[in-house]
Amino acid sequence: MYDLIIIGSGPAGYVAAIRAGQVGLKTAIIEKNQIGGMCLNWGCIPSKAMMESVKLYQRISNDSARFGIEGIDKKSISFNWTKGIKRSNTIVKRLTGGVEFLLKKNGIDIIIGEAKIISPNSVLADNRLLETKNIIIATGSSSPKIESKFDNLVVEPKKLFTEREVPQNIVVVGKSPVAIELAQLFNMMGKNVSLISDSSHIMPKADSYVRNYMESKLKKEKINIIYNTQITSTSEIWENGTLNLSGREVECDIIINASDRKANIVPSDIEIAEKDGYIIVDENCETSVKGIYAVGDVNGTAMFAHIGSAQGLFVINRLKGIEAKLDISKLPMNMYTVPEAAQIGLTEDQLKEGGYDYKVSEFPLSANGKAQTEGSAEGFVRILSDNKIGEVLGVQIVAPNATDMINEAAAYIQLESTVYDIAQTVHTHPTVSEVFMEAGFEAVDKAIHK
């Protein structure tokens, strides 16, 4: 008899498992593919590794002379996808090996196989019936497949970061930050890229100010954005390297499927309530069946690894009798675009809808000394604060390291800090993080360097 069985070993599942082991819960984790799930094996980590390779390629090609480096022949420089993938694979292997080590170190039974929930207290896996007091579903999500009768035309996310020949004309299907990231990655390699969104915009959960900034950025990079177009099958629309989209022809050698993901639903003999392709959970991440929880992408509350991990830790605390509240609005949203974007708290659209009396304070990276020296002065920090007491209600950042910088804003949000607190927090000089202090000064009175 287990205290807990976790189905899925991505960041939501393996973090919960490690913590469960640390607090003395007898735990098993079931994984049908690879330890680490999508994020470590074919999602977050490989894509970030390849993005860093491409960024370096771009910097050597475009900025070396500006930084005083001579002797580089731009015509002789090229990007080798296969070598980039080999570096990525090394990182993935190191990280997944580390996760497996930590699971075993904390006494977690690792079971490789497909799970099926038989009852609220039993799971079938690897031809074994396992009894348990509680179950956590952490099976993640995946993009619905794009049907195609043409071999190798459509590349699903799981197969993208492998050794391959990368053709010239790339079509990315999707509107999420992941889709934008992939479009920019191939564009920076010198490929001809089109991005197909099934709505009238991209990055739907981003603050509209950030969204508009990134749309403008993509257009400057000559990424062809096609709105209000949905592709579920290529059979009728692709012929000899061309997509025909209602009379609009788009050059296309491969299609990368980065469309909006849906939950990977675990087979079950009992009914677990779902809505819009996700498992329904309450504020405690508990499903409609008592003792069965769902964390991470599978519950549809947020599609970010760190939020899945936070939910996993939250459930383990509850199982150990620790009462708390998990407010997802106080957790950051990262977008690994170029430059990166990140946000936390309420967006300006939400403030307007809620009738808040608020103030917007913005400071550009172009006025920051460290950003100038690094040659990466594109972006801004934007603080939304309450006009009455100055409480920080939301923060948006566009900057090369926005996904790291947002964690300072997370601390402000968690502590219900005011713009006065930010202005009084002395930041070391020269650092890019000084833009926070400047934005705080701007909210209180006036920025020093603006």
Image (cartoon, rainbow, N blue to C red):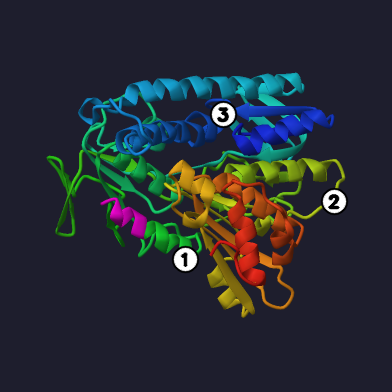
Residue 104 at x, y percent in the picture: 71, 19
Up/down of 319 relative to 108, above or below: below
Residue sitting nearer the eye, 322 or 432 = 432
Look at 23% across and 37% down and name the residue there.
Answer: 149
Q: What's the amino acid at mark 2?
A: Glu
User: N-terminal of the two: label 3 or label 2?
Assistant: 3
**Mark 3 — residue?**
114
Q: What's the amino acid at mark 3?
A: Glu
Secondary structure under tag 3 reads: loop
Residue 177 at x, y percent in the picture: 45, 50
Quadrant position of residue 321: top right
Look at 26% across and 52% down and name the residue there.
Answer: 222
**Mark 1 — residue?**
208
* SS majority, magenta: helix
Residue 429 appears in the rendering: yes
Side of 243 where 98 appears, left or right = right
**Mark 2 — residue?**
323
Side of 179 where 402 appears, left or right = right
Q: What's the amino acid at mark 1?
A: Ser
Alpha carbons under labels 2 and 1: distance apart: 35 Å
Q: Nearer the viewer, mark 3 or mark 2?
A: 2
Residue 297 appears in the rendering: no
Residue 395 at x, y percent in the picture: 60, 60
Side of 375 where 441 appears, left or right = right
Residue 2 at x, y percent in the picture: 78, 29
Up/down of 279 relative to 97, above or below: below
